[in-house]
Image (cartoon, rainbow, N blue to C red):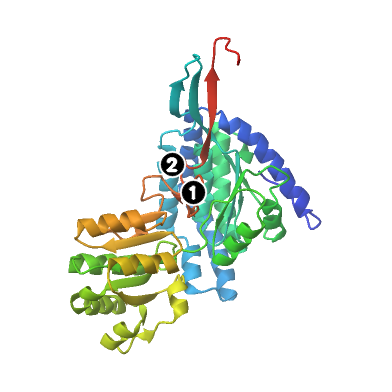
Amino acid sequence: MSVALSAETDVRAAMREIGVAARAAARVVANAPSEQKTRALTAAARILREHTPDILAANARDLAEGGARGLSASFLDRLTLNEARIEAIAKAVEDIAALPDPVGRVLASFERPNGLTIERVATPLGVVGVIYESRPNVTADAGALCLKSGNAVVLRGGSDSFHSSAAIHACLVAGLGEAGLPEAAISRAPFAAREAVGEMLAGLDGALDVIVPRGGKSLVERVQREARVPVFAHLEGIVHIYVDETADLDKAVRIVVNSKMRRTGICGAAETLLIARAAVPRFARPLLDALTAAGCALRGDDEIRALRPDVAPATEEDWRTEYLDAILSVRVVAGLDEAIAHIENFGSHHTDCIVTQDKAAAERFLCEVDSAIVLHNASTQFADGGEFGFGAEIGIATGRMHARGPVGVEQLCTFKYRVRGEGQIRA
């Protein structure tokens, strides 16, 4: 939805106007035929490709402004778009369009002794608020996922990606128009002002049903602290890899380096490497050397530094730190029990991995580590809705209620019960 702006625009009133329109649009898209939603998303993907030069120009403006403000290299990487990344955004929208429609699925059905038939049926959540920072692709991912799941969405991107998000949003709105769906189904707060976030946290006068924050720790902390509607979120991605003595060496090196260095600024990037003491003679030096060669700075405990004195000493705080940078803390543990205990003590219940050829050890790790995503012999950077076959994700949730792990179209649905009778009354 577009809101007429002026120097005197009342942010509170405008945001509530957006909320009212989104609530009305939610009633339409909740009952829209699957074909109509698919048509809107397919058109949006085409329009994203057609408008690549406009999106790149908007992104260049954001990057110039961010560079002038001294944003970090990892932050600018998350913000940067190029032709390949725009194509990936468009492809993700198409992938979401091709998913089975989650709305109306019969999740369970049963008949009572009195003849009542009861069905549990998937329904949209309603209106989803998404507050995010530097990743402009979230605009398309969140908009597409919400539409496919029959929800309306109100997007509030960060000031750092303001122009990029606006350009991408315009393509989504054009797709809605081609399919005859209300533009307010994918609304965007057209304000860089922080007051817009405050209004969303207050629920837009009852319009929002859930909020999803995508960004740094300070943003997520604020949302979890102040939101007056339910929140799907993770606070941090303190991601661990545990390598035991039975691991395949080449496999371990590939997994560890990829988990840390493929993209250091994403929430699935590894932050701590745990090595079983029995594995140290064979694994420690190859792992540390490969990480150093890839440009990773290391922080190690006393046993690691005894092998590599050039490694910086790790402090207690390092085990609790999400670096989002080319830095990795490394610790030697007695074995699987101590690795699991370390993860429970210092982890964030996001994503954790074991590298081992011991199937029994792998099963214990997968069962006992209480994280939203646990992996065996695979890079932690697979912690992503697209890699799970969800098309994309609106975020990763580490809570235990309703949605956990990558939040895709199925997790953006709730359910209701349909009860059919033939005149039964209760005694």
Q: Earlier in the sequence, mark 1 or mark 2?
A: 2
Depth check: give the residue in front, 294 or 220: 220
Of the residues shown, which amino acid type is indicated by label 1?
Answer: Asp
Depth check: give the residue in front, 10 or 50: 10
Q: Where residue 293 sits in the image (x, y, percent)?
A: 28, 78
Badge number at residue 96: 2
Residue name at image x 41 percent, y 64 percent: 344
Residue lying farthest to the bottom in this orientation: 309
- Quarter of the N terminus within the rendering: top right
Q: Position of 25 compared to 260: left or right? A: right
Say which residue label 1 marks. Answer: 141
Q: Does residue 392 lie above or below 103 as drawn?
A: below
Residue name at image x 75 percent, y 49 percent: 14
Q: Where residue 294 sits in the image (x, y, percent)?
A: 31, 75
Circle 1: element type: helix
Q: Quadrant of residue 192?
A: bottom right
Q: Position of 60 compared to 18: left or right? A: left
Q: Position of 366 compared to 142: left or right? A: left
Mark 1 in CB contact with mark 2 (< 8 angstroms): yes
Residue lying farthest to the right in this orientation: 8
Cα distance in 3D space between marks 1 and 2: 9 Å
Circle 2: element type: helix
Of the residues shown, which amino acid type is indicated by label 2?
Answer: Ile
